[in-house]
Image (cartoon, grey):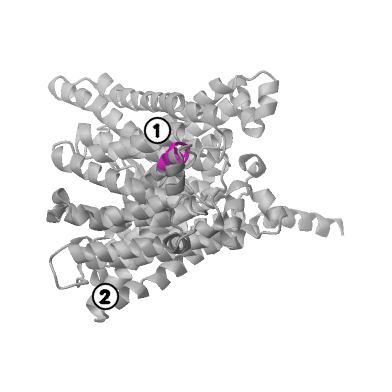
Amino acid sequence: MMESSLTRSLVNRIVAPLRSAAGLLILGTIALAAAATIDKGPYILVNTIVTGGMWALMAMGLALVFGVMNIAHFAVGEVFMAGSLVAYYTITPFINYLTKNPSPMLAALGPLVAIFAAALGGCLIGVVSELIVFRPLRQRSREQWIMNTFLLTLGLSVVMINGHQLIFGTEFKGIVNYWNFPAISVLDTYVSFDRAFVFTFAISMMLLFWVFMKFTKTGQAIRAVAQDENGALMVGIDLNRIQTLTMALSCGLAALAGACLLFMFPSYPTVGLYPLYNAWFVVIVVGLGNVAGTVVGGFIVALFQIVTTTYVGEGYGFVVPALLIIAILIFKPSGIFGSPVRGVLER
Amino acid sequence: MNDRKDVSGIQKFLNQLDLTPLGALCLVVLAVLPFIPPFTKEYLRRWLIMAILLGSQSMAFDFTAGYIGIVNFGFCAFVGLGAYTSALLASKAGVSPWFGMFIAIPPAALLGFLTGVLTLRLRGIFAAVMAWFVGLALMGIATKWVKLTEGPLGLNTPALLKTTSNLPYFYIIFVMMLLIYIVLKKVVRSPFGLAFRAIGQNMEAARTSGINPTRYRIINFTLSCALAGWLGGFYAHYLGVLMPDVMSTSRTIEVLVIAYIGGRGSIWGGLLAAIPFFIGMELVRSSLSNLPGLNLILYGLFLIVIMIYYPGGVAKIYQTLVSRAKNPFIRRLVNRDV
C-alpha cells in the first residue's frame, strides 16, 4: 500500500513535469538531437552546444533588458556585430605581431584580450545608447513605451549596420581560429580548441551571471527593479544607475557572443541578423522576460537551426523554426516555461 | 463656424472624399508635377512614382501603427507576397497583370489575417516579432525556391503597359494612392475607426465599453496587409524584375520611418513626408555614392530623433501651425466639416 503510493508519487514527480509543454519540448529536443547525431554524426551536437551557449547568452541579455526596462531590444544583433568587429581589430595586430616573433604566452592570452575588449565595447554601446537614446525618451514620455523603444532600437540598428558599411566596408572581417592549439578529441570527434573554449566560456559566464544576479547587492537591486519599479524606488534604489547598468550588461553579453563566435561568423554589416533572430526566437520560446529559461532555450533553438540547415537546406534556417514559434504562440503564448512576471511588463 | 447653407457643391464632394481644400490643392499640384520642368526628366518621374508608392505603403502601415498601436514589422513581406503572387501568375500562368494586381490581395490579406489571429490577442510586441519572423521566412522561401521565383537573380515580370514612359505609371499609382487614402479615411471615420482609436489609446477602457480588441485589431491588420499586397502587385509590374529583397527588413524600416515622420494616426502624413524625403534620400544616395549607406544612416537618425523629440511628426506640426491658426482664410482652407 505504502509502497505503491510511494512509487506513484515518485512517478508523478518525474512524469508530471515532463507532460508539461516545457517537458515535452525538452524531451522532443533530446530525442531529435539523439536521432540527428546517430544519423549525421556528432558534429551536429558539437555545433549545437557551441552556438547554443552563445544564443543563450544573447537571449539572457535580451530577457534582462525586457524584464528590467521593458525594452524590446532589436539592436542586439548589431551589438553582436560590433563585438565581433572590436575583437577582429584587436586580434589582428596580435596575429601579425606573432607571425614575426612567436611567443606562446601572447598566443594564449591575445584572444582573451580581444574577447574582453569586445565585451567592454559592448558595455560602452549600452551605456551610450541608454544615455542618449532611452533616457531622453523616458524623461519625455512613457506612453506606448514598449513600441516606441522598439522603434528606437530599430533606428539604432539601422545606424549601426550602415555605419559599419560606411566606415569598415562590406568585406568579411574574420579569422580562422583564435588559438592554434591541437583539437581535442571527444567521443571520436575532434573538437577544435576554440569551440571547446567557447562552450566552457559560455557556461562559466552563465554561472557568473547567475551568481551576480542572485547574491550581489547590485544583482538583487536589478531584480527588484524588474519586479516593481516604484517599490525599488521607495527602498532607495537608484533607478538611473540600475537601468544604465542593465543596458550595459545586456549589450556586453551580446558583444561577448559576437567576439566568441568570430571564427564562425566573420564581421560584416548584416552579420547580426542571424544572431538577433535566434536570440529573439529563444526569448519567445521560453517566454518574454524569463531570464533563467533562456539557458535551456538557447540550446533548443540552436539544435533546431542546425538540424534544419542540415536536412532541409541552408536558406530554410528561418522557415522551419518559425513553425515552432507558431505552435508556441497558439498553444502557450507565455512561452514554454511561462513567464511569471508578465503583468509587470504590460505597461 | 460657418452656416451649413454655405457649403458649396465642391466642398461637399471634398468632404465625401475626406479631403480638405488644402489637401485637394496639394493633390492637384502633385497630379501636374510630372509636367513641371525638373520633373519632366524620366528619372525624376521614376522617383516620384517610387515616392508615391512608398507614401501609399506608409499610409497602409500607419493605419495599423497609428490607430491600434501595432507595428507590422514584416510589412514589406506582405508587399512582397502580393508582388510575387501577381508576378508569378502573370509570368507562369499568363494572367493579365491588371487582373493579377487584384488577385495579389487575397494571399496577402489571408497571411495578414493568420498572423493577426495568432498574435493580436497578445501584447503588441508579439505581433511585431511574429510579423518579422513571417517576413524573414517568406524572404527565405523567395530566395531559396529558385525553381519558382528565380531567387536572387530576379524574376522577370511582364509590365503593366507596353510603353517605356513613366507617365502612365505615375497616374496609375496616383489613382491607387488616392483610393487607398479614401478607403482608409472612410474606415477611420466609421465606427470601426472609433473602435481602433479607442483600442490604441486605452485597451482597458475600450474593452470596458464593449469592444472586442482582438477582433478589431485583426480587421485592421488584415485590411492593412491587403492594401500592402495590392501595392506589391503594382510594384512587380512596374519594375519588371522582382527580387527577394523587396521583403527585406530594411524596406520595412523605410516605410516605417516615413510613416513616423509623417505622424502616426494621421494617414496622410506619411504621403506628405514620403515625396520630399524620398527624393532627398535619392539625391543623397546618387550624389554621395562613394559613401554607401549614408542615406540609411540618415533614416535611422531621423527615426531616433523623431521618436524622442517630435513624436507627432509632420501631422503635429501641421496641426499646431495650420489647423489651429487664427487667420480665417487658413481656417476656411483647412476645415473639413464646415
Disc 2 and disc 1 on one polypeptide chain: yes
Q: Residues within 10 Å of mark 1 (few under 14, many from 20)?
A: some
Please name whichever residue, A98 or A267, is drawn nearer the observer in this view of the structure.
A267
Q: Residues within 10 Å of mark 2 (few under 14, many from 20)?
A: many
Quadrant in the rendering for residue A255: top left
Q: Position of residue A2 (x, y in %)?
A: 86, 56
Disc on the earlier residue, 2 or 1: 2
From which residue to which does the magenta span run? B312-321
| Residue A44 tag number | none
Residue at image position (15%, 37%) is B288
Q: Amino acid at mark 1?
A: Val
Q: Is residue A313 visible?
A: yes
Tell whether A96 sits left or right of B85: left
Q: Main secondary structure of the magenta part?
A: helix
Reply yes or no: does residue A291 show up in magenta: no
Please name whichever residue, B23 or A156, is drawn nearer the observer in this view of the structure.
B23
